[in-house]
Image: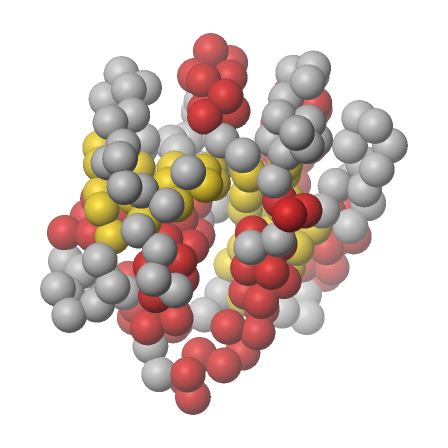
Amino acid sequence: MRTIIVLNPKGGCGKSTIATNIASYFAIKGKKVTLADCDPQGSSRDWLSIRPNAYSAINGIVVEGDRLQVPRNTDILIIDTPAAVDDKRLKKYLRKAQSLVMPIIASPIDIRAAEHFLKELFSFKGSIDNKIKIATIANRVREDTLIAAKLEHYLDNVKLPNGKKLPFMTMLRASQNYIHAAERGLSIFELPPSKTYYDREQWAPLLRWLTSKRSLPSK
């Protein structure tokens, strides 16, 4: 079973939007997808509750007490995590995942929070770049702004503990398409391509990474 976790303890960075769009992408590709909502706010669960039956099916599970009851036939498990994760729960999430996607908002507060969190992640010896692969994305970016450029520069220069570059995948713009899709229980991949072409192009590097061996731990 392929396991992808969307994680950043800073609230408001768009984890549920990223998780639901990843889940939808793989479901469209014919995979049996389970979306695990670990967030008490239940944003992913709410998204699934209004998802039309005519679209690709996605199993939904609510995680209580960190216990994951995943359907046996699941091909892809997407884990949507809550904000303010403590060290004990964080380590549990990391043990369950193969790939970690970390969305970061372009703001001074979020960039500083990301710096602290990445240092915490790297302090867990053996977790990063061996047992789990991590990649960052800039989310809800207002293009052509100074803070967006600052975030891009920061993420493009983060190094893993082994000295290798931490993969920075893409910058996703602050687009109304995500809002329109979420209101209907859909993803941008289920809206008309003519309206979401630019958004899909921005997603392409992340999807290529998630569907490649580069996002899987070394055996």
Residue shown at 14% from the left, 58% from the top:
50
The residue nearer to you, when weighing 132 against 168, is 132
The quadrant of the image that shows the C terminus is: top right
Provide residue 34's location: percent of width, then percent of height: 29, 44
The quadrant of the image that shows the N terminus is: top left
Residue 148 horizontal side relative to residue 24, left or right? right
Residue 101 vertical placement versus 206 (above, below): above
Residue shown at 70% from the left, 50% from the top:
168
- Residue 63 can be seen in this image: no
Q: How many discs mark residues in the rendered view? A: 0
Residue shown at 23% from the left, 22% from the top:
64
Residue that protrudes farthest toward the bottom in the picture: 194
Q: How is the image coloured?
A: secondary structure
Residue 131 vertical placement versus 153 (above, below): above
Residue that protrudes farthest toward the top in the picture: 88
Q: On the image, which quarter does residue 181 sit in?
A: bottom left
- Residue 127 can be seen in this image: yes
Residue 101 horizontal side relative to residue 73, left or right? right
Residue that protrudes farthest toward the right in the picture: 163
Residue shown at 78% from the left, 32% from the top:
160
Provide residue 29's location: percent of width, then percent of height: 39, 64
Q: On the image, which quarter does residue 152 sit in?
A: bottom right
The residue nearer to you, when weighing 34 against 146, is 34
Provide residue 187's location: percent of width, then percent of height: 34, 65
Provide residue 21's location: percent of width, then percent of height: 39, 58
Residue 150 horizontal side relative to residue 66, left or right? right
